[in-house]
């Protein structure tokens, strides 16, 4: 554990090796993050009157390969990014957890009652309660602690702020009460369980796993009850590229039907072939059946099924490219995935709002700047929101200027794939 004085002394210059692993080598960024930890530590001491504390960080995540493949038991490729949530925490020797997140009212979780409360659905309190309930169920120790959290993974950024928060809480409990023995993948599963059961939202495992494990990971959901997670040995920092996520705007509020149509239509193709999901169907079987099932499922469903088949295999090829250090080939497949999402999966804009095509416009502008030099694709669920681009570092200024000219200053987020997931900051 550390005191504010020791945190100032160790992190003050911003050049601590552990900070560089989390945030890169830009000294301005490093000093800013060091100051954020110091200020959050001061707030923690002022609010909870605790002199000793630990620091924690949990990254956001980006989906890199496998767009809308997980719900068909497919494969995904994802990465942890340097935009993170940070926390200062310490045991309080009670049966209560107290958490103050910047910009939100403090909340408390009573560990004597770990039952599901539907009136608390969709709250941070419910997530923390669910994580504690599941950890206790699995035989881990839980206990009261105080924490101050500074959220650096914006909601709606497509970087999964909720999953980052969940595995951050898991990491805190692991280190404060279990000597850091909670495995990263188990931490992800606990977060998913809490979100499904206590938060009231069904979700897959990709987001939590990417945030918890760190680096590039690939997940195979062929058996969704026991997904196969593999971390890739690839150093993104050496590529000379940056990952840029751009918020193109758009309102997600009325998109539930659009999102829901994707798994429904994909499954309709599988069902016509007497299977539950598309992972159980081969491309040849599907193409052979098109004349018989086309009138039943519709052309869009077939196109979306073709997208699944292509992107599911593309993840395997992308993993192979990264493992063989062939970043150029990897980038070409990022572009292929983006075109497939646009043409076949059709989740780049809504048919009933033809004048609003912010994602499509962002992709067009990205191609204008990056063609032959980088890669670009829709990011996450699609229809509105964010796009993803891999940009050569010497083109960053031009790319960001072009996109922010249209979408506004601060809408582009320069990121990199960081090697560490949800961790205690080792001082």
Image: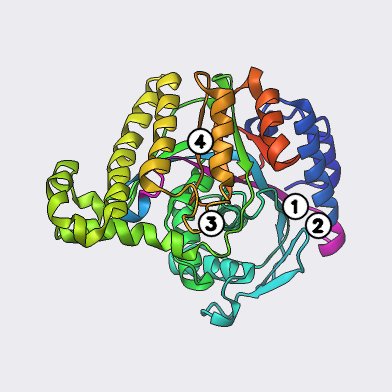
Q: Quadrant of the C terminus?
A: top right
For the residues labelled 3 and 1, the Cα–Cα distance comes to 51 Å
Q: Say which residue label 4 marks.
A: 215
Q: Assign a secondary structure to mark 1.
A: loop
Residue pictured at 17% horizontal, 57% vertical: 293
SS class, disc 2? helix
Q: In this view, does 414 lie to the left or right of 375?
A: right
Badge 3: residue crowd in 10 Å (few <14, some 14–19, many ≥20): few
Position of residue 389 relative to residue 132, above or below, is above
Residue 233 occupies quadrant: top left
Q: Separation of disc 2 and disc 3 at Cα?
A: 47 Å
Disc with the residue nearer the chain's start (2 vs 1): 2
- Residue that protrudes farthest toward the front in the picture: 355
The segment highlighted magenta reads 44-69
Residue position marked by numbered label 2 in the rendering: 44
| Nearest to N terminus: mark 3 or mark 4 | 4
Q: Return the mark for residue 53.
A: 1
Between disc 2 and disc 1, the foreground one is 2
Determine if residue 223 is in view: no
- Badge 1: residue crowd in 10 Å (few <14, some 14–19, many ≥20): many
> Percent position (x, y) of residue 92?
72, 65
The alpha-carbon separation of the residues under discs 2 and 1 comes to: 9 Å
Query: Which of the two labelled residues, at mark 4 and mark 2, occupies the earlier sequence position?
Result: 2
Residue underneath mark 3:
353
Looking at the picture, does residue 241 appear above or below residue 175? above
Of callouts 4 and 1, the N-terminal one = 1
What is the distance, in whole Å, between disc 4 and disc 1 at their CAs? 27 Å
Is label 2 or label 3 in front? 3
Please give left or right for residue 11 compared with residue 403 in the image.
Answer: right
Give x and y (percent) for residue 201.
49, 68
CB under 8 Å between callouts 4 and 2?
Answer: no
């Amino acid at each position: 554990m550390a005191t504010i004085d020791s945190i100032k002394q160790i992190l003050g210059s911003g050049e601590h090796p552990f900070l560089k692993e989390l945030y890169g080598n830009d000294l301005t960024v490093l000093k800013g993050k060091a100051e954020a930890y110091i200020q959050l530590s001061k707030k923690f001491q002022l609010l909870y009157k605790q002199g000793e504390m630990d620091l924690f960080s949990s990254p956001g995540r980006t989906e890199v390969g496998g767009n809308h493949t997980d719900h068909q038991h497919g494969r995904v490729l994802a990465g942890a990014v340097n935009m993170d949530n940070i926390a200062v925490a310490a045991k309080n020797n009670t049966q209560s957890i107290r958490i103050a997140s910047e910009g939100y009212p403090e909340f408390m979780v009573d560990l004597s009652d770990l039952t599901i409360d539907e009136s608390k659905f969709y709250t941070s309190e419910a997530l923390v309660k669910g994580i504690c309930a599941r950890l206790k169920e699995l035989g881990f120790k839980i206990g009261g602690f105080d924490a101050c959290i500074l959220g650096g993974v914006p909601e709606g950024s497509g970087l999964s702020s909720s999953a980052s928060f969940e595995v951050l809480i898991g990491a805190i409990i692991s280190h404060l009460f279990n000597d850091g023995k909670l495995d990263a993948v188990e931490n992800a599963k606990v977060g998913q369980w809490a979100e499904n059961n206590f938060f009231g939202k069904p979700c897959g495992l990709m987001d939590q796993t990417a945030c918890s494990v760190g680096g590039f990971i690939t997940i195979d959901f062929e058996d969704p009850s026991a997904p196969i997670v593999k971390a890739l040995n690839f150093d993104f920092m050496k590529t000379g590229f940056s990952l840029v996520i751009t918020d193109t705007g758009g309102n997600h509020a009325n998109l539930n039907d659009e999102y829901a149509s994707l798994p429904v239509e994909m499954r309709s193709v599988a069902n016509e072939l007497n299977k539950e999901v598309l992972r159980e169907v081969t491309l040849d079987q599907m193409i052979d059946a098109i004349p018989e099932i086309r009138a039943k499922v519709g052309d869009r469903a077939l196109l979306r099924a073709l997208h699944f088949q292509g992107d599911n295999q593309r993840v395997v090829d992308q993993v192979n490219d990264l493992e063989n250090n062939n970043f150029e080939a990897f980038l070409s497949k990022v572009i292929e995935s983006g075109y497939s999402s646009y043409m076949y999966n059709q989740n780049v804009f809504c048919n009933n709002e033809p004048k609003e095509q912010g994602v499509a416009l962002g992709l067009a502008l990205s191609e204008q700047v990056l063609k032959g030099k980088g890669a670009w694709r829709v990011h996450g669920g699609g229809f509105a929101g964010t796009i993803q681009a891999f940009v050569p570092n010497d083109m960053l200024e031009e790319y960001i200027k072009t996109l922010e000219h249209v979408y506004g200053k601060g809408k582009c987020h320069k990121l990199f794939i960081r090697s560490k997931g949800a961790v205690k900051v080792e001082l």
